Image: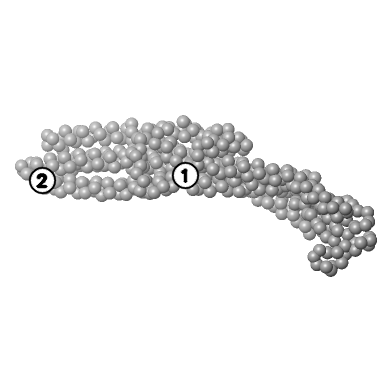
């Protein structure tokens, strides 16, 4: 009968242990479910789940993506780029630590006996001996109040920091796609312009050959035209090589074969940068993801300091014991113990100093990151505004004047008032100015695209 009661008690103890761990298991299951919902962002439904999760960390909406071909390329890059997926999974990894940090230490279930060692098995209990018994114990460690919550806050700040680094990776990839796309826009337009001027130069060369054939021109004009045509062919070859490189770069960002064909991009329409340098700096302080990540690291270290100070307080140990003694009354026991931070000058005090040094380190990193951020913003701002001024100068003044000069040279050449070399010089000059104009228009958009991951918002609507 007593053995049966012992079995029943053991079963109750195991049930108690299972109930004690039920909340921890449920938390873990919920955390795993949440992680899986973020991890599988390859479908649009899962991507919306990830979009909703952004609100946990202070972001209410995605930056608007451009329309047309550029918008399509950006969407594909956000879905397929391995760097983004890597950063997302790293966030999942760090976030999975949060329920672990908040959970109690695992309880310990003990079973033992006091009696004869023979026969083996089962061990024999000495009937009637008060010191002979089967023993069952359940022990639970309980940290001092506040320690688990601080550990959870440390894990939460680490997860939030990784979230913002994931956001930074997304913005960086978008900026790279824009940079490659606008470079491709310039190269396509440059190839078209050089090809157009090459065709025009070939017509001039045929005119020079005809004039030379009837004795109205000189051989030097024919040779000079052929040399200029060869130069344009050489320029076209270099531009085509750069175009293929730009296409391969875009494909690599989209994680697909570098030979994948890309449609002809839309022509860039000149747009001014409307924000001032001061406004860009304010946007960066408010929205730059890497800056937010660094602030969360400082918060994490602050909680680590508080946790280290909590280690001066003892933790508790609660133990419930049961003894089954044949032919004698059963015994129960309950004990509470605490650990004594006796060697605090060797453990707790250095731990507080370590945590404080960690916080100071992250604060200095924030200062350095902010200084570097302002420099990078000004560098890209000057690049954008300078390119904007040059594009305006070429588009409104230099190119119209060069076009008029070329038209005048063509008219003069037809009546013999201008020599062929002057005509060629005007044609080459106009070509170079047109190429410079398209390059500066492209440079404006490339500089603005490089500014966007620094300020954390889209600068083009």
Which residue is under mark 1?
80
Q: Quadrant of residue 145?
A: top right
According to the image, what is the colour scheme of the structure?
one colour
Q: Which residue is rendered at x = 34% and y = 46% of the image?
A: 243
Query: Where is residue 276 shown, x and y percent of the image?
Result: 50, 33
Query: Where is residue 428 shown, x and y percent of the image?
Result: 24, 42
Query: Where is residue 160 shown, x and y percent of the image?
Result: 62, 43
Q: Which residue is rendered at x = 54% and y = 38% of the image?
A: 46
Horizontal side, residue 145 vs residue 64: left or right: right
Q: For this rendering, which residue is in front, 190 or 320?
A: 320
As drawn, which residue projects farthest toward the left? 214
* Secondary element at image label 1: helix
Horizontal side, residue 63 vs residue 430: left or right: right
Which residue is under mark 2?
218
Q: Nearer the viewer, mark 1 or mark 2?
A: 1
Q: For this rendering, which residue is in front, 328 or 258?
A: 328
* Secondary element at image label 2: loop
């Amino acid at each position: 009968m007593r053995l049966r009661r012992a079995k029943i008690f053991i079963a109750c103890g195991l049930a108690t242990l299972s109930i004690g761990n039920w909340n921890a298991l449920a938390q873990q299951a919920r955390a795993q479910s949440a992680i899986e919902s973020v991890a599988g962002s390859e479908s649009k439904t899962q991507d919306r789940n990830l979009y909703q999760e952004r609100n946990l960390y202070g972001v209410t909406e995605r930056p608007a993506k451009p329309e047309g071909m550029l918008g399509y390329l950006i969407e594909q890059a956000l879905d397929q780029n391995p760097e983004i997926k890597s950063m997302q999974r790293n966030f999942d990894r760090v976030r999975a630590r949060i329920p672990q940090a908040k959970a109690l230490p695992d309880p310990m279930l003990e079973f033992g006996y006091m009696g004869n060692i023979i026969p083996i098995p089962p061990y024999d209990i000495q009937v009637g001996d008060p010191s002979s018994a089967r023993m069952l114990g359940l022990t639970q460690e309980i940290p001092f109040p506040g320690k688990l919550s601080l550990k959870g806050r440390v894990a939460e700040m680490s997860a939030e920091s990784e979230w913002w680094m994931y956001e930074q990776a997304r913005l960086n990839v978008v900026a790279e796609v824009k940079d490659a796309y606008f470079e491709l826009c310039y190269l396509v337009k440059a190839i078209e312009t050089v090809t157009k001027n090459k065709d025009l130069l070939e017509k001039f060369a045929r005119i020079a050959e005809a004039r030379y054939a009837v004795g109205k021109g000189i051989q030097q004009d024919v040779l000079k035209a052929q040399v200029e045509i060869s130069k344009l062919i050489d320029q076209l070859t270099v531009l085509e090589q750069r175009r293929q490189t730009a296409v391969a770069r875009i494909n690599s960002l989209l994680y697909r074969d570098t030979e994948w064909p890309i449609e002809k991009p839309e022509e860039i329409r000149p747009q001014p940068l409307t924000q001032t340098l001061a406004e860009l700096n304010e946007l960066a302080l408010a929205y730059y993801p890497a800056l937010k990540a660094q602030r969360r690291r400082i918060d994490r270290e602050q909680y680590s300091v508080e946790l280290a100070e909590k280690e001066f307080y003892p933790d508790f140990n609660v133990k419930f014991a049961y003894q089954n003694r044949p032919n004698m009354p059963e015994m129960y026991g309950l004990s509470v113990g605490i650990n004594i931070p006796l060697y605090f000058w060797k453990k707790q005090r250095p731990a507080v100093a370590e945590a404080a040094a960690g916080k100071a380190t992250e604060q200095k990193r924030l200062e350095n990151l902010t200084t570097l951020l302002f420099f990078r913003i000004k560098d890209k701002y000057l690049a954008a505004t300078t390119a904007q001024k040059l594009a305006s100068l070429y588009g409104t003044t230099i190119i119209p004047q060069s076009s008029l000069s070329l038209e005048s040279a063509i008219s003069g050449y037809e009546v013999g008032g201008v020599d062929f070399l002057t005509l060629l010089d005007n044609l080459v000059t106009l070509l170079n100015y047109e190429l410079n104009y398209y390059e500066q228009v492209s440079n404006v958009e490339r500089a603005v695209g490089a500014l966007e991951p620094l300020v954390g918002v889209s600068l083009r609507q």
